[in-house]
Image (tube, helix red, strand yellow):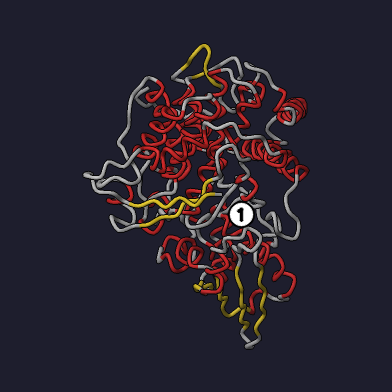
Amino acid sequence: MIIHKVKVYPSKINLPKKNQLAWKIAEISSDNSKLNKKSVDMVINRIIDNASVAIASLNRKAVISSREMALKHLRKNGANLFGVNKKIKVDCEWAAWSNGTAVRELDFHDTFLAADYSHPGDNIPPLLAVAQQKKVNGISLIKGILTAYEVQVNLVKGICLHKHKIDHIAHLGPSVAAGIGTMLKLKTEIIYQAVQQALHTTISTRQSRKGEISSWKAFAPAHAGKLAIEAVDRAMRGEGAPSPIYEGEDSIIARILDGKKALYKIPLPKKNKEKKAILETYTKEYSAEYQAQALIDIAKKLNKKIDNLNEIKKIDIYTSHHTHYVIGTGANDPQKMDPNASRETLDHSIMYIFAVALEDADWHHVKSYTKKRANKKSTIKIWHSIKTHEDRKWTKKYHDPNPKNKSFGAKVIVTLKNGRKIIEQLDRADAHPYGSRPFQRANYIKKFLTLTGKIISKKESNRFLNTVQNLSKLKPGQLNKLNIEINRSKLVKNNKIGIF
């Protein structure tokens, strides 16, 4: 890896494009790196993972709206929509919009946490949509996805957006543009312009994940993917972008992030080196914020240690800065303690999640979030007894540069009414790559079968799983086989009319 130092330059200094971060991203996107077998296998795992959560969310409100919007943009040789007959195609940017929303809706796909947050699987819907419309082959799609993961993961390692309350999709726009560039074998110059345009148009605030969280949380990455596709289209037609987008005097860094005195260090692989960043990412066993994964495992273990949950006086969770301030009591969001809060809000409340997991010794992507479940009196009692605390030791482990040492866990102290304390801690979720039972291909398939079993036919399930595991051999025009269809009568419609 090469560590690139990125800082702001005044306009009077004409920074050569080859010294700009966007160009360096474009260079590795247009190189000729060999494929790493483990990385290729993981791409297949993540396509299965995305399909699992997308199909499970098809009849949720945000996904219904996105699908009906997309269906107003039909295109004979376009891209497919999850759940919809493969003969019906739409413009690829609208397929990216709808499929991206379906993938993100349940907050149940992969994650990467470092200086900032990310869900790298958000790259897959826009790349797959473009791949279907442009009729690329399976290998090209794989290469594009590997580039997208490489770019997003390394931007997340080097640049913290959350510090400035900027939503993490600002790293997604450039990664999607870079991935499409690889997939379509575009020239470095075109990718360079597209990356800059994609970043410029995908800056938004973190209010989408604050307070009363709305369905925009699911729409946001889909919107970034859609904008990135449009950025690539413009760049392919010879249009330029605000430049230098990272280092300029009035750039993203200068005006929105750390300012004119900033110095960021961004790792990127050398040209033509294997892209393996996808192997550093991890999926979710439970439908909840990733930083809750280990805490759900802890709660399940504590359930077996505490004979009577009514005897709990208080629960203290010692964890990292991000966990405490984003999904803990450090966020100072009263909505996180409200039984009538939205599902999206409860998904970002470790207090709620821990209370339910402690009582049920389990977690379910639907049942654990129902209004009835959230309003259970015994749950509310435990929920409101929980307080989180930042512990610098956990924060340090959270940011450890060695993937094997990174920790997204916590130490939990349960104090009973008689004064007895029960302690449990876990560095990382059991399903994490370095956890006690890492997710393997069989686990991804089991997750797929569990989430889709009552929605799609066994024949369609088997067909998809056989196809995706043969991805590298799919020829141009065959990527529509990655679409999953369900009976038309099972797709719910929204009776509200929009502009389209």
In this orientation, which residue lies closer to the viewer: 128 or 83?
128
Specify few, some or many for label 1: CA neighbours under 10 Å numbering under 14, 14-19, or 20 or more.
many
Secondary structure under tag 1 reads helix
In this orientation, which residue lies closer to the viewer: 94 or 403?
403
Q: Position of residue 31 (x, y in %)?
A: 55, 32
> Can you say whether 377 is above or below 200 in the image?
below
Which residue, as the protein is rendered here, is positioned at the far left? 12
Tell me: 161 left or right of 110: left
Tell me: 136 left or right of 499: right
Tell me: 388 left or right of 417: left
Q: Position of residue 122 (x, y in %)?
A: 53, 39
Tell me: 103 left or right of 172: right
In this orientation, which residue lies closer to the viewer: 312 or 35?
35
> Can you say whether 44 is above or below 394 in the image?
above
Looking at the image, can residue 335 be seen?
yes
Q: Amino acid at mark 1?
A: Ser
Q: Position of residue 77 (x, y in %)?
A: 53, 13
**Who's the residue at 35% across and 37% down the image?**
201
Q: Position of residue 131 (x, y in %)?
A: 56, 23
Q: In this figure, which residue is indicated by the disc labeled 1? A: 368
Looking at the image, can residue 343 be seen?
no
Which residue, as the protein is rendered here, is positioned at the far top? 76
**Who's the residue at 54% across and 55% down the image?**
113
- Picture quarter with the C terminus: top left
Q: How many marks?
A: 1
**Who's the residue at 51% across and 11% down the image?**
76
